[in-house]
């Protein structure tokens, strides 16, 4: 009895992980002197303006402690603030100071930039907000009017991770691939460039641009849909392209763009990789060391994921899943470290990179640290790319460890899924995804927002590129899994999240806080002995940095995934987080959070000691409307279910456990069902629903509808049972 239930839970989880992964994108002794750096006086002309000099001062601990001037606060991306007015003794008095509702209730992943009391942040569809950081008053707004159907080509929600600010301009990279310079005072467009090389391919941008040497660095995403990765540097004043670095080789009949591409091409096999695109998108992380004059960029997964199609005779497939160091002046290759050679698991190395100076074995080492999706925490020498150490920070089954001499993973028996499906940790969600880590030079610890989510990899023997949806050449395990096995408890049985305090010198966990759900928020750490993060179940939380003791929490009413940040205005310290449930896992498994009583509501939340603001009460739960009766045969429902999971699940979520952040289709009324076929065929462009004309037949639409009606009736019956209890 117990065994059967366990098997059903495992089977359901396997199914769930396959489905969710279809939607993924689918990552001591410190130089910082510490303590109380003196505030520097701004001249009238520099107030409110940002500069590389100011960011460097913040990094060296010589002023700028009130500000958050760059994405990871400083070039080294440590996400450490020297502010300590809010600290481990008074954080319990932290209250909401102000909140601002955003225009679109989808995932919010941005880190706000704060300069001299003004905040610049973003919401879904790359909408930019300039705010008074003390009051939350809107100063200006810029909406790039991204076509809403770009949501369909963004693997993991129409999210944006924030702006860059330099001198008198605010820079946004939009979901539809433009880099736009805005006047910092008014939000008016100064210049706009198209960063996409081929608009017939499904490129998108969700990353925050980064600043180095008077340039803006920006990559893109799209490796789930068949694109070739690259990143580009643009002159910050004019928008003129300075250089471009391709991350995977193109058509070998054409000349190589660089010596690096000539080298990379030798690691690919077969005659189609350039047609598939190859992948290797640089969709998030960048760090910069001005002293070494090196720019580090994290590179993503292969396209398609399945290497059997991409590079059939093997090969490392450079620069997939690599950290690449280039000269920021020229974009020339300097070194690379490949975390997952020949990646076939969507194990991107785009996850957040932190630069720090550590004492390792009695030696001061300039290191780069990353916890990519593949489950290993890497410490590299950032001058040479040499591996210093690597160890697993979550459960890992694809590899037994990292060989210290070759720097390569030691593959396990279950690493090959070409002949049989493989149940694997971590999943394409990663042991850690884009949610930024933080490094506290006072504790010497890296705080990793980690998670345990398994996945079953299946070779798709009949793979053909599709017009809509993912093209990752993976198959589906869909036999013998009972529909009612999709219970939230079943999913939760094998997935979880944790905040892990990691000692990068000893490669070992010092403390951890477990969360019931995966897909929690990025992290901030401060000189107040604090670590701030957020949770999928709708909380903003603070722990002591040294011991991991929970000291404070507040409700966000929505799942929190973005990293908190902090700043000071008029002598008062504030903590801000962009709250808004969404992103890869949320889209598909949205009900995991719904079960915790949270919604998809996008807001800026700002806290201070003794704040007096409050959030409006949560709107009532959506009632079940009048729905059609379920009259379809089990066979019809099963066919519909397969189609639903092929086309709809990426945005509308697992119908069996509920919707994601988008419309839960079980809540469609009888009236709405009458126009269902037309909506699927023609789309709802203003809501981001693409048209499936020519992709899904009229007959298939009916099957999908039958499945939705069945699930709606299941939900109605469940609610009825709950009410009578
Ligand atoms: Ca991916």
Image (spheres, helix red, strand yellow):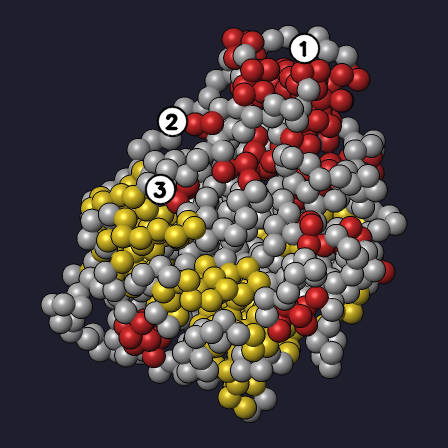
The answer to whether residue 524 is visible is no
Q: Quadrant of the C terminus?
A: top right
User: Which residue does the image show at 39% across and 70% down from the upper left?
Assistant: 212
Along the line of sight, the residue nearer the viewer: 447 or 645: 645
Residue 549 as seen in the image, left or right of residue 152: left
User: Which residue does the image show at 28% across and 72% down from the upper left?
Assistant: 54
Q: Are marks 2 and 1 in contact (CB under 8 Å)?
A: no
Residue 185 rendering spot, x and y as whole percentages:
19, 53
Q: Is residue 20 above or below residue 31?
A: above
Is the CB of the residue bearing disc 2 within 8 angstroms of ligand 1? no
Residue 197 rendering spot, x and y as whole percentages:
52, 52
Read off the residue under disc 1.
Answer: 630
Residue 599 as seen in the image, left or right of residue 720: left
**Residue count near mark 2 (Cα–Cα under 10 Å), binned few <14, some 14–19, many ≥20:** few
Q: Which mark is residue 384?
A: none
Mark toward the viewer: 2 or 3: 3
**Residue count near mark 1 (Cα–Cα under 10 Å), binned few <14, some 14–19, many ≥20:** some
Q: Which mark is residue 144?
A: 3
Nearer-N-terminus badge (2/3): 3
Read off the residue under disc 2.
Answer: 619
Q: What secondary structure is found at the residue carrying circle 1?
A: loop
User: Which residue does the image show at 42% across and 56% down from the upper left?
Assistant: 208
Residue 204 rendering spot, x and y as whole percentages:
51, 47
Along the line of sight, the residue nearer the viewer: 492 or 294: 294
Q: Quadrant of residue 57?
A: bottom left
Q: What secondary structure is found at the residue carrying circle 2?
A: loop
């Amino acid at each position: 009895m117990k065994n059967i239930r366990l098997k059903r839970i495992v089977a359901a989880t396997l199914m769930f992980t396959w489905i969710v992964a279809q939607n993924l994108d689918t990552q001591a002794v410190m130089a910082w002197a510490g303590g109380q750096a003196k505030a520097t006086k701004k001249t009238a002309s520099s107030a409110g303006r940002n500069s590389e000099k100011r960011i460097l001062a913040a990094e060296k601990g010589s002023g700028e402690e009130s500000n958050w001037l760059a994405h990871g606060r400083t070039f080294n991306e440590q996400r450490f603030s020297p502010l300590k007015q809010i600290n481990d003794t008074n954080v319990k008095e932290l209250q909401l100071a102000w909140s601002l509702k955003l225009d679109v209730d989808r995932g919010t992943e941005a880190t706000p930039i704060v300069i001299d009391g003004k905040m610049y942040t973003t919401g879904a569809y790359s909408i930019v907000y300039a705010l008074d950081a003390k009051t939350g008053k809107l100063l200006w707004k810029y909406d790039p009017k991204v076509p809403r159907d770009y949501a369909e080509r963004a693997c993991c929600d129409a999210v944006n991770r924030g702006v860059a600010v330099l001198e008198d301009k605010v820079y946004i990279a939009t979901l539809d691939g433009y880099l736009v310079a805005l006047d910092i005072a008014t939000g008016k467009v100064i210049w706009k460039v198209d960063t996409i090389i081929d608009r017939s391919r499904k490129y998108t941008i969700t990353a925050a641009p980064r600043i180095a040497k008077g340039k803006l660095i920006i990559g893109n995403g799209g490796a789930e849909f068949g694109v070739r990765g690259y990143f580009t540097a643009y002159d910050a004043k004019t928008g003129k392209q300075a250089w471009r670095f391709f991350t995977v080789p193109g058509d070998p009949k054409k000349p190589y763009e660089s010596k690096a591409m000539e080298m990379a091409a030798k690691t690919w096999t077969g005659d189609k990789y350039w047609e598939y695109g190859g992948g290797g998108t640089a969709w998030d992380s960048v760090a910069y060391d001005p002293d070494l004059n090196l720019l580090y960029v994290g590179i993503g997964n292969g396209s398609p994921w399945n290497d059997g199609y991409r590079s059939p005779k093997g090969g490392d497939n450079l620069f997939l899943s690599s950290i690449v160091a280039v000269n920021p002046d020229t974009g020339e290759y300097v070194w690379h470290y490949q975390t997952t050679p020949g990646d076939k698991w969507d194990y991107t190395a785009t996850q957040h990179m932190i630069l720090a100076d550590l004492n390792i074995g009695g030696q001061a080492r300039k290191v780069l640290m990353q916890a990519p999706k593949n489950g290993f925490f890497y410490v590299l020498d950032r001058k040479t790319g040499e591996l210093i150490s690597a160890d697993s920070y979550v459960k890992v089954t694809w590899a037994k460890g990292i060989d210290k001499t070759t720097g390569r993973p030691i593959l396990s028996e279950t690493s090959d899924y070409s002949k049989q499906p493989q149940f694997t940790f971590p999943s394409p969600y990663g042991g850690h995804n884009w949610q930024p880590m933080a490094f506290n030079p006072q504790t010497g610890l890296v705080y990793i927002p980690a998670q345990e989510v398994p996945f079953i990899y299946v070779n798709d023997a009949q793979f053909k590129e599709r017009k809509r949806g993912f093209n990752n050449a993976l198959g589906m395990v869909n036999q013998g899994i009972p529909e009612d096995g999709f219970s939230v408890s079943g999913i939760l049985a094998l997935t979880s999240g944790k905040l892990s305090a990691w000692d990068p010198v000893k490669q070992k966990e010092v403390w951890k806080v477990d969360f019931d759900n995966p897909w929690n928020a990025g992290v901030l750490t401060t000189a107040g002995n604090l670590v701030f993060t957020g949770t999928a179940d709708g909380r903003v939380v603070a722990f002591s940095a040294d011991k991991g003791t929970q000291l404070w929490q507040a409700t966000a009413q929505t799942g929190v995934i973005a990293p908190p940040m902090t700043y000071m205005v008029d002598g008062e310290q504030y903590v801000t987080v962009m709250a808004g449930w969404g992103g890869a896992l949320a889209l598909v498994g949205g009900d995991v959070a719904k079960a915790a009583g949270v919604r998809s509501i996008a807001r800026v939340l700002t806290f201070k000691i003794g704040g007096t603001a409050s959030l409006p009460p949560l709107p009532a739960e959506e009632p079940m409307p009048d729905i059609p009766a379920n009259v379809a045969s089990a066979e019809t429902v099963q066919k519909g279910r397969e189609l639903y999971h092929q086309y709809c699940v990426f945005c509308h979520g697992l119908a069996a456990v509920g919707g994601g952040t988008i419309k839960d289709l079980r809540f469609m009324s009888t009236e709405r069902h009458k126009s269902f076929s037309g909506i699927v065929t023609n789309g709802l462009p203003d809501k981001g629903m693409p048209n499936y004309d020519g992709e899904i037949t009229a007959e298939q639409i009916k099957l999908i509808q039958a499945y939705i009606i069945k699930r709606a009736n299941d939900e109605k019956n469940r609610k009825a049972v709950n009410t009578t209890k």
